[in-house]
Each structure stands twice: as structure tokens, then as C-alpha cells.
Image (cartoon, coloured by chain):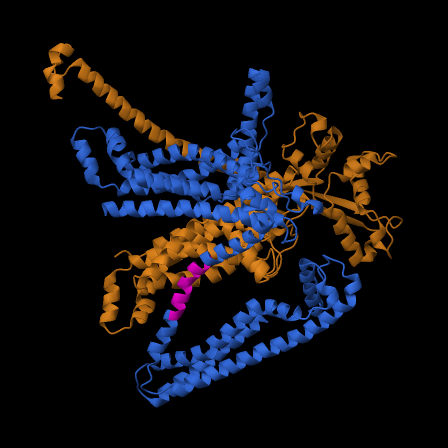
Amino acid sequence: MVWIVLVLLTALSALAYGLGRRKAKAAGKGHSRPNYQGAYVALWAVVPAGLLLAVVLVFGGRIEHAMLSADAPAAVAELPSEQQEVFYGDARALAAGKATSGTYDFGPLKAHLDAKAAQSARQHQIFLTAAIGLAIALALGGFALAFSRLKPDFRARNRVEGWVSGLLIACSTLAVLTTIGIVASLAFEAFRFFQSVSPLAFLFGTEWSPQIAMRTDQVAADGAFGAVPLFAGTFLVMLIAMIVAAPIGLYSAIYLSEYAHKTSRGVIKPLLEVLAGIPTVVYGFFAALTVGPIFRAFFNWVGAQTGGPLGDYLMQVQNQMALTAGVVMGIMLIPFVSSLSDDIINAVPQSLRDGSLAMGATKSETIKNVVLPAALPGVMAAMLLAVSRAIGETMIVTMAAGLQAKLTLNPLETVTTVTVQIVTLLTGDQEFDSPKTLAAFGLGLTLFLVTLTLNVIAMRVVQKYREQYD
Amino acid sequence: MTDALLTADAAGAPDPRRGRTADFEARVKKRNAAEKRFRFYGRLAIFVALAFLVTLLGRIVSQGYHAFTAYEVSLPVYIDPLRVDRANPMGANYDALIAEALLAKIGAPNDELGENLLAAQELVSTDLGFNLLDQIRKDPNLVGKTLTLKGPVKADAQLYLKHEIKRETAEGDRKISDQQMDWIDKLEKAGVITGGFNTRFFTASDSTEPEQAGVLGAIVGSALMLFVTALLAVPTGVLAAVYLEEFAPKNRWTDLIEVNINNLAAVPSIVYGLLGLALFINWMGVPRSSPLVGGLVLALMALPTVIIATRSALKAVPPSIREAALGVGASRTQTVFHHVLPLAVPGVMTGVILSLAHALGETAPLLMVGMVSFNPGIPESVTSAATVLPVQVFIWETASERAFHEKTAAAIMVLIGFMILMNLLAVIVRRKFERRW
């Protein structure tokens, strides 16, 4: 269906282009070349109709759904809202000759369902005919309008370029629309979540057990959605990751930019970039099946050597713990920290170094006392960006940190993070309206706001710092 | 320094060569030592980072290379007319038939309780039984004849053949008994079980049986999804970059767009997954776990990187090109689309390939849009249910069977292989077409 329409639209545009060009050629030399005259006609013939069809393609389903549910039979109107949704979905599936979802059994409402299915089939027919008719009318109307405008002194090129710049602006607006989409969808679903769970209980509650709240007699009981353990877990894993990544990343950046020979820099930098290019799921696999067991074996061995209550505790350490996830995430962040710091250190003007060296300072003294203080705001910003990365990272923690929401700062315990909980709440089959799934959007909104703040601060600092030496 | 010279007598005997005190020498030594230490820390940091890289890749290769070999069994089975009903081939127990043939090859008796039979059944994949049933349903005349069946050896038996399950392990701790191990050795000697390159890994899709699982479905799913991503993100990203770099006036609106693009590049990927779930699936009704919805999400994710890469490619085109075009009377649109953009194409291509390679490895947002599901088939279109390579890695990693671990590592090797290919392509494009002014 979509392909047929696309082919038809292409054929139509080619036809309109050809006709417009011929008319322009026949009319003789004018303002714009015949190509532009043809393109002008083609644009008017295809774009309005194409836009209409795109809108129908994207929103048609919802419009039909709304039309179908406009006059609900009394028996259906009594159903809970999510069952009504499924009811109309089933009716439309029946009309399209597909199997029903089977989520609910509408036994006694079978007659209503069949009636609605018939209505839906009729509606679909009318809707489709109307859409296609309107599209054809738009195409012909646009063509006629543009074709009649063609004259030798018609400024077709300026018009076509107007269309082009309109397209360019639309494309660049998409970035803003994405942000609006993210904020709107997160805020909307989170708002629905906060209607059943108070924001205070969510932000300051210390007990996280969304599974219990799934029980029907206990829907969204306050206290089950206290996100503090998740924040603590996220913080702990982030802290460990930064303890690994910050020194290694910073020192390797210093070495690469201040000491390394050009050739060794040419070899080492791409290798570090390989580390940055490895998918996070691979790091997760590495954490779960290599680093986790090694740490566990190590701590169990230490526990066996020491004995006593501490030894007993160490003997029980599991594969999944904050330390495993944190260390592997730290490895992942090394190239990130290193390349950002490298840029910043390179941006420190050579004159500062030369001045310090001329005063008799050694190279390391120059770096420690002159270059690093000058680069400090930028390096801090790089660290903030790395922190934001660590907070938003999902796969490593999902595969290596665990699922138990514990309020602890012990790196040997299994912890859970915000991102892990989003994944566990939203994978698997469940209804979309339950507080459990909506909680994921509450977490997502928190995550988005925190990382956004960190990013904005970091980018401001980097920008300001760059201007300082430019 | 002057200080040191003035107090030379007080501090100790002066150095006869340069007139320096021992105190001075000691301080220089200390400073030089600090210098050496500092340099050593730098070297150490790089060494540690590279050691992590080598360990990571080495571990994956060492865990995964086994999955590229597989052991097949090739077994003549007599289709006993007494046991298989021509009219109703569904009713027969083919697994038992195959296990008996296997026992006969081994030379072990079938005891009354059928324990040997069960033990033998555990050596070959269930695929053989289904295969046999299919053949007989197609051609009932096969009943009464001897057929040579070919199929994979069961995963646990394969692990023994690859020496990953060892005889030294206590019998209770492994899935293969001593008796089964003897049988496997015997069968291998007799040529019933032979090893070779694991073509099935590349021609099959996901399966609940490790020995039958392959990555073809995931590769096709990844390809379809990247196709959607490229189709959406590349034109919009390039056009947006053209606008921002060549046309946009410097005002609040363009500043807002710039800030937005930089922020979007740093938004956690899982947030894009939430957006995809709320917007594309729940609101627009795009089918769940389809390459279409995955591609849409990744297109939004890739958009900022495509824009940033295209802008730097456009920036590299010298202004003289623009001035020349404008000078001979081209309009601004003509200048950009006839002269500047074509010259920037190699840079744009490099950036696009790299951001698509990054999209290929993305996992977290795809979990949100339902791609983490069991898909035993090969996806037919962009709207059918599919899985992609990194998600396949995640699914297999969480599987409990040990045999899936080597499959996971092998799937990672395939994934990284594709990423290396794309990066190489980007390097080639850059080397071959890049112009320097």
C-alpha cells in the first residue's frame, strides 16, 4: 500500500515536471530556466498530497479509533478504560480480518464487538476513500495552480528555493522537536505516575519494590516506589567508575599530549578509540562472565584466608556487585575522559608552557603547576560529562550490577540503578497503564533532568574556557 | 639559586665542578625523580588502558572461537514399518528410533528401563527427529528403508568434544555422564560424529536449543533496522546541517537549535528508548519489536552525530569555493547544492558511516521498544518482529545454558566484525576521496 502510493507520487512528480518544463521551453527565454519551472510544478503537484497522505499514515489509526469509540454502547462504556481500549482494538482487528488480541474475554459483549467490527470496516472504507480522494484533488489542484502560473517572467527559481529553504528549516527544527518529544512524553507519563504515587514518596522513599505493588489489592501503595536506593546504587556505581576512569584517563591524556612521541601517539590514540567504539553490551558480557567471577574468586579467597565474621562475609560475595559494574564502566569511560582531557590540555597555549620551562621548572612541574591549573575548569567539565555518561549507562549495570534495591555504600553488595530498573520495569509483557510501567517514566524523567543539568553545566564551562584562550 | 650560592659554605662543601652544594644536588635529584615518577604514571595509565583492551578482546575471542566449529552426526536409521505408520507418521517416536540406531552403532544394549536410550537421546539434537518426520511426511514411501540422517550433536556433548567439559570434573557437576563420554569417544572414532566449520551459526536464527541457534535472523534484523535509520537520519541530518552551517542567520532560534543538538548528543540512550515507547509504539501504533520502530529510535539518536559530522565537513570546504560560485551569479541555494555539498560528500560519508556503526552496537533503547524477544525466524519486512545483533548478544548472555556463552562471545565477534568493516569503509572513503585545500 505504502509502496504503491510512493510509486504513484514519484510518477506524478515526473509527469508534472515534464509538462511544466515543456510549457516553459515553448514559452521561450524568461527569468528562470525550464528545469526550475518544471520543478515548481512538480512540487505543487506532489508535496501537499504527499503531506496529507503522511498525516493519514501516521495519525489515521488514532483518528479511526476515536471515531469508532465516539458512540460507545452502554455495556462497553461501563468497562474500565484499558479494557475499552482493547475492545476497540479487537474490533478493528476483526474488521481487518486479523486475530483479536485475546487479552480479555468479551464473551457477553460479542454482539457489540461484531457490530463495532462492521462499523469499523465501513468506517475504514469511507476514511480511505476520503483520504485518497482528497489527495488526488490536492495533487490536481496544486498542479493546475502551479501550471497556470508559468510565464516567461515568472520567478520559478526563487519559489523553488523558497521550498528548499523551508525543507532545510523543517529538518533543523527536528532536533528541537526531538527534545520537546522527549520532555513531553516523559513528563506526560510521569505525571500519570505521580497521580498514584506522590512525588515526595518517590524522591525520598527508601523502599523500592514495584513487584509487590502489582498485586491487585495493593495497587500503587505508597512506599513501594521509594527511589532513594536506586539513586544510591547509581551513585555508588558512578563513583567506582570515576575512581577507575578519572586517574587513568587523565594521566593517559597528559602523557599523550605532553610526553608521547608523535609516532607512539599515532598508534596509542586509535587503540584507545577502539576501546570507545566497543558496544556497551560487550562490556556487559565482559563484566558478567569475566570480571565478576574473577572478583568473586578473589574475595572468596581473601575471606578464606582471613576468617572471622569479615571472612565469612567475603566468602558470600556474589558475581553481581557494584564493584564489578563500576570497574567495567570505568574501563568504558577511560577513552571518553582521555580524549576530552586531551583536547582541553592541547588548548592551553604553548606560551604558558614555554614561560614555565624558561623559569627552570621541569616538565612535570610545568604540567602540575601551570598546565593543569589552566586546564582545570575544562577537565572538571570533562569529568562531569563522564559522570553524566556513567549515570545514563544501561547495559553494563543491567548485566553486572544486579536487581536488588539495597540502600548501601558497600561496593561488594549487589545494587541496582535507575537505568536497570527502567529496563526491568519495561521489558516483558505487562499493561502499559499500571503504576509499575509508569514508574519507569518517572525514573526516566529524573535521569533526563539530572544528565541534562550535568551536560549543560559542563558544556557552558567548556565553551567559556575555550573562549578564554581563543 | 642565588640563595643556594650565598649559603654554599654553610650548607656544606661546594661541588668542585659547578660550584653547587650537596643540598642543591639533592633537590635536583628529588625533582628529577618526581619528573620520572610522573612520566611513569602516564605510561602506566596508558599501559593499563591498553591492557584492558587486550584482555577484553582476548577473553571474547578465547570464549567464542569454539562456536565457529561444530560437530555433526551422520547416522543411518532404519525406518521400521512396524513402528512408523505410513498413514499417520505423526504418531511415531522418532527420537527413540534415532537413539536406538545410535545405541546400535555404539554397541550398547537397550536395557528394559530405557535408561540407555534416554542417555543416547541426550547426545543428538532434537532437530534430527523433526527432520526425519518432515521427510516421511513428504514421502511416506521412505518407511521401510534406511535413511542417513545428518544433524548437530547436542550442545552439552559438543562442549565435551571441544574439551570445555572435562572428564576430571566430578560426574555430578557436569551434564554428561562418564558412560556418555565413552560413547561420544567411540562415535567419533567410528566417524559417526565429525567436526567442521559451523555453517549453521550463520544460516540459522535464534533457537531454544544452543546447537541449533544462529545469528542470521539477527544480522538480517540489524540490516533492516540500519536501513531505516540511514533512510531517515541521513537526509534530515545532512539538510539540517546545511541549513545551520550555510543559511542560518545568527539569532536566538538557531542558538536554541545548536544548544539542543549538543544536548541531544549527550542524552542517555535509554531515554530515547522511553521516547520511542511512548511516542512511536503507544501513540502512533508502530508495531512493537519491529526493525521500523528500532530504526526510528536510532534515527533520532543518530541525528545529532550526523549533523555534527556534516557541519564539520561543510566547514572544511574553503570559502573561496562559495565566493567563486556566488561571483559568477549562482544563487545561494545553487552555490551550496551544486558546489559546496558535493565537495563535502566524502567527509559527510565518513561521518555517516561512523554514526551508523555506532547505531549498530546500540542496545539499551532497543530493549525499551520490545526487541528483546525470542524470534526463531528471519524477519521478512521492516514491520515484522525481529531482533538485532547486540540484543541477540544480550538475550544469549542471560540464557542459563552454558553452551550459549560461547555463542554469545561468537555473536559479539560477528558484531565487532561488522563494526570493523564499517570503520574500515569510513577510513577508505576518507583516504580515497578526501581533498585537502
Front-most of residues B174 and A338: A338
Front-most of residues B143 and B272: B272
Looking at the image, residue A67 lies above or below residue B1: below
Front-most of residues A418 and B374: A418
Q: Residue sitting at 62 percent across and 41 percent down?
A: A224
| Image position, residue B265 (x, y; %) | 42, 51
Looking at the image, residue B391 lies above or below residue B226: above
Residue A167 magenta: yes
* Magenta residues (range): A166-178
Indicate the colour of chain B: orange
Quadrant of residue A407 within the rendered picture: top right
Front-most of residues A244 and B74: A244
| Image position, residue B296 (x, y; %) | 52, 58
User: Is residue A75 something that shows in the picture?
Assistant: yes
Residue B174 magenta: no
What type of secondary structure mainly makes up the magenta span?
helix
For residue A234, side relative to residue B243 (left or right)? right
For residue B50, side relative to residue B404 (left or right)? left
Q: Residue sitting at 53 percent across and 81 percent down?
A: A136
